[in-house]
Image: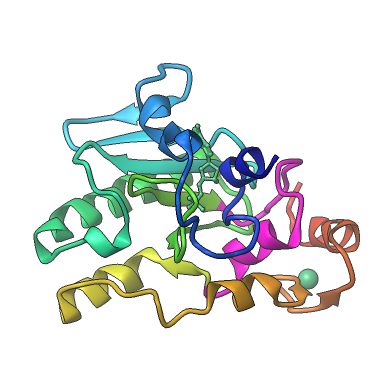
Amino acid sequence: MATKRSSQGGATDNGQPAKKKGFWALGLLDSMKDPALQHFTDDKIVVIKDKYPKARHHFLVCPRLKINNLKALKPEHLPLLNHMHEVGKRIIKESIGEEELKYQLGYHAIPSMSHLHLHAISRDFDSPCLKNKKHWNSFTTDYFVDSMELIAELEENGCVDTSGRNGEELLKQPLRCHVCKSQFANMPKLKGHIVKHIKK
Ligand code: AMP
Ligand code: ZN
């Protein structure tokens, strides 16, 4: 069922923004209220555990302020985005400890879920929920918009425009290891390879 797959992934099934999102796309708003998923809260943000984590450590930093998506961002949101970045960084670092591959902080260029959310994710990508090429490429290609780059773009241009990134093409890119760039024919081969880069 397309709607179910979409809610678990970093991208809709065809790699395009869902024209009409279903009820599942609002699931983050419910999860933000769920004590079982809440990891940290303050007056500005709620940090939840991703329900379908794509790595050993995967958090979503969500503003309390209703911001639908990247297009809705305005310069007045810069302090909030910086706060989301700083808290996301602290939480993912605390969670990872001393693991070698570290973490990345950023946004999907074409998110599947409504309500702005910053991914704070460890770079092991070692999770049974990371199943397919779209999942992989949504975190390891330019589909993943680095948080600091997004903040810089908003500072410089007064808005964020990800339309220059061809989401569909990026999600179809060949499977490449994010560490050594070796190319693999399928996910099992890639997953078998990346464990070599992960400190146990
Ligand atoms: P994206 O919208 O592409 O930036 O990614 C949405 C993220 O939300 C994915 O990593 C999903 O695993 C995650 N997700 C989907 N539904 C929920 C939910 N109800 N609660 C928490 N996380 C979710
Ligand atoms: Zn490699």
Question: Would residue 39 be visible to someone looking at this image?
Answer: no
Where is the N terminus found, in terms of image quarters?
Answer: top right
State which region is magenta. Answer: 122-142
Q: Is residue 11 magenta?
A: no
Q: Is residue 46 visible?
A: yes
In this rendering, the answer to whether 163 lies above or below 128 is below
Q: Residue at x 50, y 35 (%)?
A: 24
Q: Residue placed farthest to the left in the image? A: 76
Q: Quadrant of residue 13?
A: bottom right
Residue 175 % position (x, y):
77, 72
Quadrant containing ligand 2 reads: bottom right
- Name which residue lies at 61% across and 49% down: 9
Q: Indicate how the structure is coloured in the image.
A: rainbow
Determine whether 58 is above or below 174 in the image: above
The structure residue drawn at horizontal position 26% and vertical position 68%, both measured from the top left corner, is: 151
Taking 166 as reference, is 60 above or below it?
A: above
> Which of 96/51 is in front?
51
Is 123 within the magenta?
yes
Q: Residue at x 45, y 50 (%)?
A: 20
